[in-house]
Image (cartoon, grey):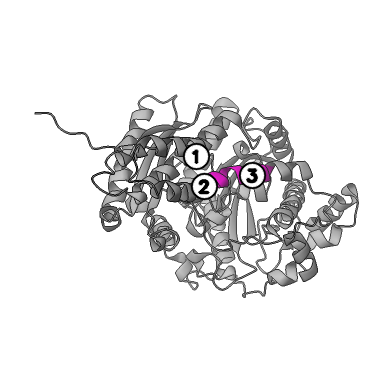
């Protein structure tokens, strides 16, 4: 890819540069007295704009899903203590079903009288089963209330159109600490967003142009999401990230934890995307751009407000954390008005009314998330570094909306997506391999059931990528340190993904 080494070459373009700024430490963001009280569970004043019921619901979902993954190791430790006892297979299955919600595969536990349990394989198998559990619950129960038919989605779709946008396309960094960007940090119904995560938020320009073409073509042919004569635009957004607690080490690895480079390269990618549309179709006015930064410690965002002509000043942004403090003593309506005025005055030029309303909305939404982190995580996450549970590889994963649950490597081929995938494997060498635990990789390809033979092609893609992953990391595989789980899903249906199999499946013996 032409842009693969862009972040390493800061002199590649002659565009504006942004000097590295000083960011507040966690102690400056949350006063010591407030931080101590929150960590002790004492309720603290909340902002008038905070959605307390939504915060409670989101925390319940986060605790439930992550709790399932956290129970795996303690349960396996318990099972390992009696593997030489009589009736081990039956007892292990009962414990696993009671505490994890599923039984253990017989082919991994029935030969303990011959050899010790393969705890690495059992760990990976439990991770895959737990992933399948929460994935099925997500599609069957809609715990985040963001499915297409939900009231939240309908309201946001109307709001987005009123702002002058017919589609919202967001690229967060593939870092697992940004996996919750849509549903938590920005509080946007997930079905109303086209999300593709990439390392460093460096999305593929050519593929994004192709998605833009498909969107515009659908408007002309089907009038969806609105007719082509509507005065709306395609909103492309990049979310880069930084760390207020440890800016020099826990920022974006793809940009060397340099926040100014992360912002600059995100903006360059956005500008190149719009230039590509203008050069190819002479209609750049149908594309709007937005650059957002996310503090992975506090979940507060900063928004680089664009002018009407698309110019962005990298040295200037609106901090949700500052807005929180400025408006915390105001009534709801007055607080929203103050935020709107702040947005209107923060651009380097004239700004469209619709963009003002959209930015105001996400800043208001982020105030709830700031209170969420303060109430349930003591003001800043304890896991300020990586703590993902598995790597997601391929195309899909619409169900993943939790922080530090998944490292994404969106790709069609391993060769093409090798840089993203290698970063993920490197992360998991520290998270898992260093503790003698394997790397769980879920391979996923979504397809359109309306297209003939699409399912067969998705199956072939899964198998092809699986073979490439096992080949690329052969040493880890041979050492029992990497396992894969293959799934596909019809994106035109509401149902969960279909499991194709895994590298843990029993090997069938040939008959002679």
Disc 2: which residue = 71
Report the front residue among 73 and 204: 73
In the visual, does 481 lie left or right of 13?
left
Alpha carbon of mark 3 to alpha carbon of mark 2: how far? Answer: 25 Å
The secondary structure that most of the magenta stretch takes on is: helix
Q: Is residue 137 magenta?
A: no
The quadrant the N terminus occupies is bottom left
**In this view, the mark in front (3 or 2):** 2
Q: Which residues are magenta?
A: 58-69
Closest to the camera, between mark 1 and mark 3, is 1
Q: Is residue 61 magenta?
A: yes
- Image quadrant assignment for residue 112: top left
**Mark 3 burial class by Cα count in 10 Å: few <14, some 14-19, many 20+:** many
Instruction: Say which label, 1 or 3, has the lower sequence index.
Output: 1
* Mark drawn on residue 203: none
- Could you say whether the residue bearing mark 2 is in a helix, strand or loop? loop
Tell me the residue that label 1 is attached to: 100
Image location of residue 250, percent across then percent down: 55, 67
Quick check: marks 1 and 2 in contact, CB under 8 Å? yes
The residue indicated by pointer 3 is: 183
- Whether residues under marks 3 and 2 lie with C-beta atoms below 8 angstroms apart, the answer is no
Q: Position of residue 302 (x, y in %)?
A: 69, 60
Classify 10 Å Cα crowding around label 1: few (below 14), some (14-19), many (20 and above). Answer: some
Taking 311 as reference, is 208 above or below it?
Answer: above
Tell me the crowding category of disc 2: few under 14, some 14 to 19, or many 20 or more residues within 10 angstroms, Cα based: few
Say what secondary structure mark 3 lies in. Answer: helix
In the shown orientation, is residue 321 left or right of residue 82?
right
Q: Give the percent coordinates (x, y) of residue 114.
A: 23, 45
Decide if residue 412 is in sight here. no
């Amino acid at each position: 890819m032409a842009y693969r080494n862009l972040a390493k070459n800061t002199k590649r373009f002659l565009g504006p540069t942004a000097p590295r700024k000083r960011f507040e430490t966690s102690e400056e963001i949350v006063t010591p007295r407030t931080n101590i009280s929150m960590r002790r569970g004492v309720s603290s004043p909340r902002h008038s704009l905070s959605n307390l019921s939504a915060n409670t619901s989101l925390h319940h979902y986060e605790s439930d899903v992550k709790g399932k993954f956290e129970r795996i190791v303690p349960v396996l430790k318990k099972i390992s203590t009696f593997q030489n006892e009589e009736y081990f297979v039956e007892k292990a299955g009962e414990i696993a079903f009671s505490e994890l919600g599923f039984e253990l595969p017989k082919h991994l536990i029935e030969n303990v009288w011959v050899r010790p349990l393969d705890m690495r394989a059992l760990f990976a198998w439990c991770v895959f089963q737990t992933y399948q559990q929460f994935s099925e619950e997500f599609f069957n129960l809609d715990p985040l209330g963001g499915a297409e038919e939900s009231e939240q989605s309908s309201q946001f779709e109307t709001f987005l159109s009123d702002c002058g946008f017919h589609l919202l396309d967001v690229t967060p960094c593939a870092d697992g600490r940004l996996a919750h960007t849509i549903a938590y940090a920005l509080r946007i119904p997930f079905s109303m967003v086209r999300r593709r995560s990439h390392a460093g938020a460096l999305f593929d320009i050519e593929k994004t142009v192709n998605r833009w073409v498909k969107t515009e073509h659908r408007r002309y042919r089907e009038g969806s999401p609105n007719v082509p004569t509507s005065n709306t635009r395609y909103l492309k957004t990049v979310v880069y990230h930084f760390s207020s607690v440890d800016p020099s080490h826990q920022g974006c690895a793809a940009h060397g934890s340099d926040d100014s480079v992360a912002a600059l390269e995100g903006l360059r990618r956005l500008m190149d995307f719009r230039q590509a549309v203008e050069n190819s179709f002479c209609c750049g006015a149908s594309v709007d751009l937005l650059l957002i930064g996310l503090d992975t410690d506090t979940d507060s965002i900063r928004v680089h407000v664009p002018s009407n002509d698309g110019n962005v000043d990298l040295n200037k942004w609106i901090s949700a954390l500052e807005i929180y403090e400025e408006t915390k003593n105001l009534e709801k309506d007055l607080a929203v008005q103050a935020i709107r005025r702040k947005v209107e005055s923060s651009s380097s030029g004239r700004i469209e009314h619709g963009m003002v309303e959209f930015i105001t909305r996400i800043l208001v939404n982020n105030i709830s998330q700031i209170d969420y982190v303060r109430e349930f995580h003591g003001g800043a996450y304890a896991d300020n570094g990586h703590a993902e549970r598995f790597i997601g590889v391929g195309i899909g994963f619409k169900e993943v909306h939790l922080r530090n649950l998944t490292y994404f490597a969106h790709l069609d081929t391993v060769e093409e997506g090798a840089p993203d995938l290698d970063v993920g494997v490197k992360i998991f060498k520290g998270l898992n391999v260093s503790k003698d635990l394997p790397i769980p990789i879920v391979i996923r390809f979504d397809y359109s059931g309306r297209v003939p033979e699409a399912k067969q092609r998705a199956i072939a893609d899964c198998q092809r990528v699986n073979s490439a992953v096992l080949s690329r990391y052969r040493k880890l595989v041979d050492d029992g340190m990497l396992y894969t789980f293959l799934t596909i899903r019809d994106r035109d249906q509401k149902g969960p993904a279909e499991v194709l199999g895994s590298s843990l499946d029993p090997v069938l013996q040939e008959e002679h």
